[in-house]
Amino acid sequence: MKTSDSPETGIPARVLRYETMAYGLFLHWGLYSVQAEGEWYRHHHRIPQEAYAKLMDRFTAEAFDAVALADFAVSAGFRYICLTTRHHDGFSLYDTRGLNDYDAPHSPAGRDLVAEFVEACGARGLGIFFYHTTLDWWDPRFDADWDAYQQYLRDSVRILCTEYGKVDGLWFDGNWARRDRDWQEDALYGMIRELQPDAVLINNSSIGNLGAVGHPMLDAVTFEQGLPARKAPGGRYVAKEMCETFNSHWGVAAKDYSLKGPPQLIETLASCRGAGANLLLNVGPLADGSLSAYERAALQVVGEWIQRCAPCLYEGRPVDAVCRGRDFVLDDGEHLYAFVHNVPIRKNMHLSGAERGDGLQTVEGTLPEIRRVSWVDNDETLDHWQDPAKAMLVFRATPNPYGSQRVVRVARMERG
């Protein structure tokens, strides 16, 4: 049954629900993971299909544990997971049910990995999102018979929409590869709306078109490795999502040492929410389906920060207010929250890299009466002054207690 739209805003309920998911885990996993040289390994190294297909003989998925993965995602603060059910190499992690035998059940893995993923996520309340390529390097119809390929694509997506229960979203990628072609989006999205009316529809606009509003049936715009703008796109309401890599590749790359650390991830997540956007953070599982120890550890730190410092990230929506630098304010319907960067450490300012000064923070904008301001992480009350006539609130951001550094510190502003 289709959920009702918001009577106050007219925004589809599926979009509002998606925006409160806030933080998603993106998983790029497939045959390319066996080689561990990135998800475009075949294309950039010009590997012939016959040679590339031999990677299938080594795709065992022996360490893929969907239950453990879902448990980890919940503990790390994620509210949804988007899995590459099929990437550009044409190999599917799901049972294609006779469309081809280029899928996980026909590999040494011998399992429908998407079915395991869906069951585990559903049991833990995680949003279930399917990434599916529209570009295909494997199927010859992509170049030789466009209409036949489009039918194959729809038949593939129909399987995902009919064989795995309720789907929270479908995330497409590849239309940028043939900008001069008719991608028959009306037929594809119309089919999905009929089969999965509450699924969020996303089609990646790619790096060159950050925030571009696509087909009118799409529910969100994407910012691939680019921070979203705070200003909403013109016209109809659409959600926003930044998809970001953990290093410099989407699929696992064993020689890529450009791994991000928790402070960078925390700041990126905060910036996304300050712009009213979700963050879909990617990791590339190893060939066997497990996550690397470093990525797990870093993501766990971010999860701890969310739990201790910023649980308002999920339901909070941006407030039209001007703050210092990158700072911003969210409103979760109960309280307002100021996200403050560069807060020093008490007695340790020479090491923190923070701003000097008296710690006074200003919030300019029309706000309700605020009776109390306090840090979320320790409930310390902060001095504040409010001048409604000038639409300004000032509070004193005290330093982090020695022995702590929250990276982005959050102050709760309680309504009077």
Image: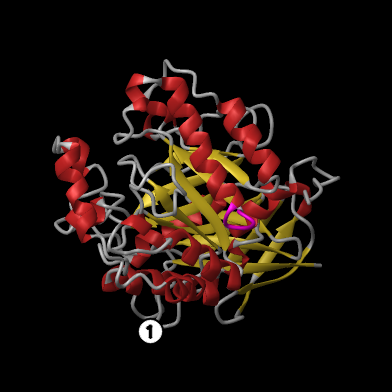
Relative to residue 129, is residue 45 drawn left or right? left
Residue 387 sits in quarter:
bottom right
In which quadrant will I find the C terminus? bottom right
Magenta span covers which residues?
Answer: 163-167
Main SS of the magenta part reads: loop
The front one of 168 and 160 is 160
For mark 1, what is the residue? 403
The residue carrying pointer 1 sits among few (fewer than 14), some (14 to 19) or many (20 or more) residues within 10 Å by Cα, namely: few
Q: Is residue 27 above or below residue 60?
A: above
How many numbered tags mark residues here?
1
Q: Is residue 384 above or below residue 135?
A: below
The front one of 397 and 65 is 65
Q: Can residue 114 be found in the magenta stretch? A: no
Mark 1 lies on a secondary structure that is loop
Relative to residue 265, is residue 157 drawn left or right? right
Residue 412 sits in quarter:
bottom right
Q: Residue at x 48, y 39 (%)?
A: 172
Q: What kind of colouring is applied to the model shown?
A: secondary structure
Residue 185 in view, yes or no: yes
* Picture coordinates of residue 125, whole percent (x, y): 61, 69
Residue 287 sits in quarter:
bottom left
The front one of 204 and 108 is 108
Q: At label 1, which amino acid type do we have? A: Gly
Outermost residue, right side: 7
Q: Is residue 411 above or below residue 179?
A: below
Q: Can residue 165 be found in the magenta stretch? A: yes
Outermost residue, bottom side: 403
Q: Residue at x 57, y 57 (%)?
A: 164
